[in-house]
Amino acid sequence: MRSISVLLSLLAAPIQAAVSISDPSDVINPADWAADNALLADYNVAFVETQPSDVKAVHIYSSEAVALNHLSLSADENDTSVILVSENGSLTGSYLDILKTGYSSNLLYASFWGFNAAVNVANSSSAHLDHVNITVHNGAANVYSYGTGSVVHINDSWLYSSGPVSHGLYASGNGTIVGRNLKVYSGGTRSSSFSGDSPAGYIYVYDSVAHAKGVGSATFYALGTVHAQDVVSISEHGPVVFMDGAQNATLVNCDAAAGLLGGVALFSSSDRQSGAKLNLINSKITTLGDIPGLWFGNTIVDVLINSSQIVAPSNVLIVANYSQITQDFDYYAGFEANSDLLPAEVYAEVHESALSGDLVPYNGSYISFSLNSHSTWSGAAYSGFGVGLIDVALSANSNWTLTANSTVQNLTDADTTLSNIESCGYTLYYNSTLNEWLGGQTVLLAGGGSATPV
């Protein structure tokens, strides 16, 4: 999967050591399922607003309680689950090997109603699973929860999937899944490790490892609520977090890498919505390649970065744009794809963190960036294409080091002497009308540059 580098010291001499973390793709070679993973989902089919009544499964437990132990279960027909728990049913499953093959003939049915999922828990039902190995081929979720009152707990388990829309944990219709000590691999396109879907899914993941390989496959797809704690992950061709609309995602003690679009990619796929929340606490996001750390389009979002790192080789920390993401989740789409977009608004609050990279709003978008509680930032603030607006605020014990000439609208600094801004010879331009406290004066900064009114 990947290695986490740990800096050790031996007799005061630093030694670089690698800690290897395994996932199910170390057991089942994804190359053996390359054709399966190359399949693309077809969403150009009629959407059904109500739950279909013909969900099929080999083992159906409706309105009953059942316990399964030390069994091997399988299904190979199309659109057919291995296990379906429905209508207030309950399942307790331990030490199960579950194999699902067979295709989804309607990917919307698979997405929104759990057709073809290996384990489908629906309609106020519950499941408690531990020590289960679930392998899925041809496109299907490993574990699916649908409907208000449907709750799945899955512990100490191993999930592998190939094919499109093959999320590891997948909740929709206000269903809930709680996972602990999981190892998850998803190889197909648009197959996130942990995913919610319309109208909302509630995903809670702890002490787990996740690897998503396909294009558009994130570690977390937040449509509803995602809470992750102590999760190590890589999304080779997707972001760590996808979010569509006013959803909530919180990462605590997580170490995650992303290879496409951005470390996170938060957007609204139709009308711009407000109320989205992203919380990064004691976590690290690393981007692989020339992509921003945090990307936002056509959304209004609150971001909390607390004791966290965002490592972006692109040197772009935050992008806010008049944009969204294509249906295939493979690139940013602009006005030509949707003329009803609006600029993004990002309200980022930083505590106890050392960050680097630039703030870049595009096309009328706005970034509010507030450094608090002994935080540091090394970067520049400037517009991308068109007019972009940036406000920067610093507590007295936080510091900003400029890496290029920068322009802000509101500059708020609890240190009224601006001694916590290191200019490195660059100029910080501020709006004289909005910053009367600076008296419209040019203020010399440490490092030879200045804060200059415009």
Image (cartoon, rainbow, N blue to C red):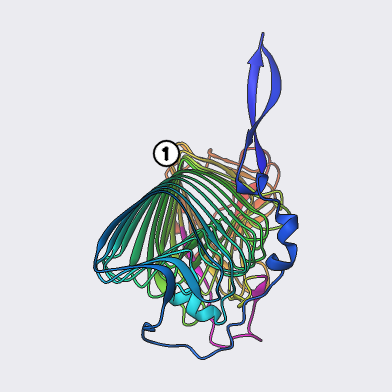
Q: Is residue 38 visible?
A: yes
Residue ID at (34%, 61%): 176
Q: Nearer the viewer, residue 45 or 115?
A: 115
Vertical placement of residue 224 versus 427, above or below: below
Rendered-image quadrant of the N terminus = top right
Task: Tell whether 45 sits left or right of 276.
Answer: right
Q: Nearer the viewer, residue 163 or 190?
A: 163
Count of numbered tags? 1
- The local secondary structure at tag 1 comes to loop
Q: Is residue 413 visible?
A: no
Vertical placement of residue 180 versus 91, above or below: above
- The residue indicated by pointer 1 is 373
- State the predominant SS element of the stretch in magenta: loop
Magenta stretch contains residue 254: no
Residue ID at (26%, 68%): 124
Q: Amino acid at mark 1?
A: Ser
* Residue sitting farthest toward the bottom: 46
- Quarter of the image for residue 202 reads bottom left
Residue ID at (36%, 73%): 173
Rendered-image quadrant of the C terminus = bottom right
| Residue 253, percent from left and from top | 46, 40
- Binning the other alpha carbons within 10 Å of mark 1 as few (below 14), some (14 to 19) or many (20 upward) gives some
Task: Tell whether 13 sits left or right of 271.
Answer: right
| Residue 216, percent from left and from top | 63, 66
Task: Tell whether 340 sits left or right of 386.
Answer: left
| Residue 197, percent from left and from top | 44, 71
Magenta stretch contains residue 338: yes
Vertical placement of residue 299 versus 253, above or below: below
For the record, the magenta segment spans: 330-347
Q: Nearer the viewer, residue 212 or 345?
A: 212
| Residue 117, percent from left and from top | 48, 67
Q: Nearer the viewer, residue 37 or 360?
A: 37
